[in-house]
Image (cartoon, rainbow, N blue to C red):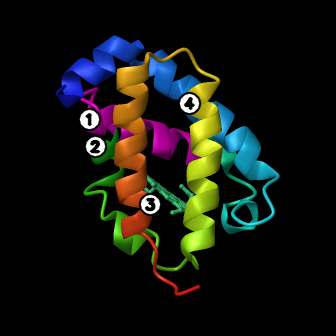
């Protein structure tokens, strides 16, 4: 399964919008990761993650055009991300994916990618 086929198969932009919106609804009130996010710019945060994911999975390259190279490790360096925070991020994302109509193979592909990235972003022991 290549990235482009995932983007098409799950329904493109609209589906990424839905997943990311659900995800941030839960992040807002989350005790561990909620406080890390810009409380005045939830919409901006939603846009950034949606554009990144859509681009990664073969959609338009809006993310690169607006934000440049992702450099995710650098962009997360000033947040204190331990394994508990990564685990929570993944849990909330799993819920968002489960509550969206995405077929199992694509769901699995999304999860695998998120998991790999989340573990790579851990920058604090604990
Ligand atoms: C491991 C747990 C994670 C934590 C605690 C975390 C936290 C954050 C926070 C606080 C921001 C700033 C919000 C904003 O202003 O945009 C952010 C941005 C972002 N995160 Fe994460 N994140 C995590 C994992 C991930 C994963 C797994 C991905 C990708 C699959 C990801 C992709 C992004 C992207 C694309 C941005 C916007 C970067 C930019 O252009 O500025 N994050 N994250």
**In this figure, which residue is indicated by the disc labeled 3?**
118
Query: Of discs 3 and 1, which sits in the foreground?
Result: 3
Number of the front mark, 2 or 1: 1
Residue drawn where x is 42% and y is 48% of the image = 114
Element type at mark 1: loop
Residue 58 included in the magenta stretch of the image: yes
- Label 4 vs label 1: CA separation? 22 Å
Q: Main secondary structure of the magenta part?
A: helix
Report x, y in % for residue 108. 39, 33
- Give the image quarter of residue 19: top right
Q: Mark 2 and mark 1 in contact? Answer it, CB < 8 Å.
A: yes
Q: If you read the primary sequence from the N terminus, does the residue marked by circle 3 or circle 1 appear first?
A: 1
Residue 54 located left or right of residue 84 = left
Residue 76 image offset from top left, x and y in percent: 46, 70
Q: Which residue is mark 1?
A: 61
The residue tagged 4 is 97
The magenta-colored residue range is: 45-62
Q: Is residue 19 left or right of residue 11?
A: right
Name the front one of labels 4 and 1.
4
Determine if the C-beta at disc 4 is less than 8 A from ligand 1: no
Local SS, label 2: helix
Q: Nearer the viewer, residue 111 or 44?
A: 111
Say which residue label 2 marks.
Answer: 65
- The x and y percentages for residue 42 are 68, 47
Q: Earlier in the sequence, mark 3 or mark 2?
A: 2
């Amino acid at each position: 399964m290549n990235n482009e086929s995932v983007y098409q198969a799950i329904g493109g932009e609209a589906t990424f919008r839905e997943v990311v919106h659900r995800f941030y609804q839960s992040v807002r009130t989350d005790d561990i990761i909620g406080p890390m996010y810009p409380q005045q710019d939830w919409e901006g945060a939603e846009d950034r993650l949606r554009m990144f994911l859509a681009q990664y999975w073969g959609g338009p390259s809006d993310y690169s055009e607006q934000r440049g190279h992702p450099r995710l490790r650098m962009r997360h360096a000033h947040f204190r991300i331990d394994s508990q925070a990564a685990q929570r991020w993944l849990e909330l994302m799993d819920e968002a994916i489960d509550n969206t109509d995405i077929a199992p193979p694509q769901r699995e592909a999304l999860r695998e990618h998120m998991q790999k990235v989340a573990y790579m972003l851990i920058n604090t022991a604990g």
